[in-house]
Amino acid sequence: AKSMGGNTVSYYSSDLDKRIKDKMRLEQKLRVALDKRLLEVYIQPIYDAATREMIKGEALVRWMDPEEGFISPEVFVSLAEESGLIYDLGSLVLEKVCAYLHEHEGKLHLLGMRTIAVNLSARQFFASQLVTYIEATFKQYQIDPKQIEFELTESMVMDDVDQAIDIMRAIRNLGCSLSIDDFGTGYSSLSYLKQFPINTLKIDRSFIKDIPEDKNDVEIAYTIIAMAHNLGLTVVAEGVETKEQWQLLRDKNCDYLQGYYFARPMPMSDVLMLDNVINLL
Ligand code: C2E
Ligand code: CA
Ligand code: CA
Ligand code: CA
């Protein structure tokens, strides 16, 4: 029993040890991948619910490690956030998006993709150089700021509401638009929402995935759409995977839809081969 106890203890500690080592190894790999600029940016098109026209896109970072395969951004974005690598990751994404917009402006305009949304994490958003950096990057790539939207989450904005509003205003003053991502998952304070200089709410996928079966979720989605419109905001539903979801959301005047039913995130070059209006069965 004594030796078994000893084994158990060493089993648990080596398990923890292994997790820490794995994390450090992944962080080191991410550092190297960022230095070599091996990360890629995929784009997922977003469609007008009523006309089925492509309207904008969301940039989503991708990391293919030769040994590990595709690693989920859920894993490495938070790792980057903890380790400070998020600044390099964020600038890689913004620069790739700007280079793409610069090179393919005409084609993207024809496609209807006039704006590309870029996700910002908390540390990026509150970094003092953020707005100066964004402005300099637009100049470097000769980008009209109207072509870029930034996605923020409720929870990160609620960390320091007054400062967040100042930063949001500065970003809007550049000419960019702003959306609140994953809406409904943070503790949403409606009185604050009214003060945020934002353009769009994105209904979190968790409220979309079980509609139309889950009647509570249907009601929540309707309520968010109506509330957003009352505040003068447009609404995007995330994670639309079925025809029923599309039709229900369209009939309730949800403006824009994003999800596998329409298109998965894809390499930037693939976007250029899409049709402006999507054909749905
Ligand atoms: P998010 O910003 O909420 O992005 C939407 C996620 O939903 C993406 O996952 C997308 O691939 C996925 N998705 C889209 N449509 C559907 C659908 O119909 N069904 C399902 N099941 N999923 C759908 P992805 O690309 O794995 O990204 C996960 C998260 O990682 C993002 O969530 C975002 O929080 C973060 N992330 C991704 N790229 C970046 C980036 O460039 N910068 C930062 N800071 N975070 C990023
Ligand atoms: Ca997003
Ligand atoms: Ca989201
Ligand atoms: Ca999310």
Image: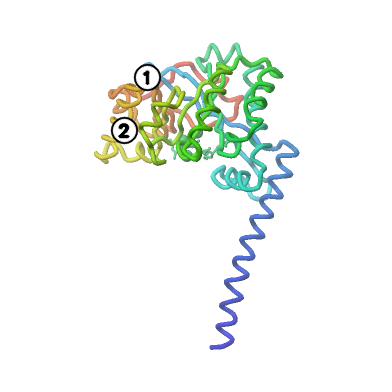
- Describe residue 119's horizontal placement relative to residue 205 as left or right: right
The C terminus: image quadrant: top left
Name the disc covering residue 232, or none: 1
- Of 62 and 18, which appears nearest the observer? 18
- Describe residue 85's horizontal placement relative to residue 183 as left or right: right
Secondary element type, mark 1: loop
- Describe residue 141's horizontal placement relative to residue 149 as left or right: right
Q: Mark 1 or mark 2: which comes first in sequence?
A: 2
Dividing the picture into quarters, in which one does residue 118 lie? top right
Q: Residues within 10 Å of mark 1 (few under 14, many from 20)?
A: few
Q: Residue at x 43, y 22 (%)?
A: 47
- Of 6 and 246, which appears nearest the observer? 6
The residue indicated by pointer 2 is 221
What is the three-letter code of the residue carrying label 1? Gly
Name the disc covering residue 39, or none: none
Query: Which tag is nearer the camera, tag 1 or tag 2?
Result: 1
Horizontal and vertical percent for residue 75? 57, 47
- Of 4 and 147, which appears nearest the observer? 147
Dividing the picture into quarters, in which one does residue 236 lie? top left
Q: CA distance from mark 1 to mark 2?
A: 17 Å
Horizontal and vertical percent for residue 205? 40, 37
Horizontal and vertical percent for residue 98? 64, 22
